[in-house]
Image (tube, rainbow, N blue to C red):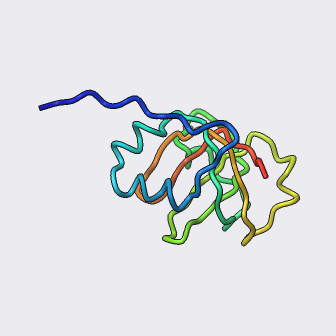
Amino acid sequence: MVTATPIPEPIPQGDWIELDDISLEFINNTIAANSKYLNQTISIRGEISKIDYKRATSFGLNFYAHDIPTVELVDSGRNRLWCGLDSVDKVGNLSVGGTVIVNGTIIAWDYNLLYVLPCSIVD
């Protein structure tokens, strides 16, 4: 028997979710998590593990020729989030090991990596 996919409840504006929590949702049931989060713009908090550039092809953007400034977050289970920044204005205030809240659109989950693009630094 096939049932309709429930309409996801949006996360209220101004709220954020921990990277640990959203990663666990994807690990436990990727289909349900995709239904809830894919193409949604949300805020996520996590620990910074890297501030660097990623090739656009890493985000699946084969048509985009430039590298994308990226803040990488990591959770306690070593799952990661790539935040493809739309602006580098707040990057100077960040450091590896610090905690940050990012806001962006979930474009994919692949094994243990959450892709968020475009993305910005909230706090």
- Residue found at x 56% / y 58%: 19
Quarter-of-image position of residue 96: bottom right
Q: Judge whether 78 appears above or below 37 on screen.
A: below
* Residue 39: % across, % down: 52, 33
* Residue 117: % across, % down: 62, 40
Q: How many marks?
A: 0
Q: Judge whether 5 appears above or below 48 on screen.
A: above
- Residue found at x 58% / y 57%: 18
- Residue found at x 56% / y 66%: 75
Q: Judge whether 123 appears above or below 12 on screen.
A: below
* Residue 68: % across, % down: 70, 46
Quarter-of-image position of residue 45: bottom right
- Residue found at x 88% / y 58%: 92
Quick one: 28 or 83, which is closer to the camera? Answer: 28
* Residue 66: % across, % down: 70, 42
Quick one: 9 or 33, which is closer to the camera? Answer: 9
Q: Judge whether 76 appears above or below 106 on screen.
A: below
Image quadrant holding the N terminus, namely top left
* Left or right: 2, with 101 as reference point: left
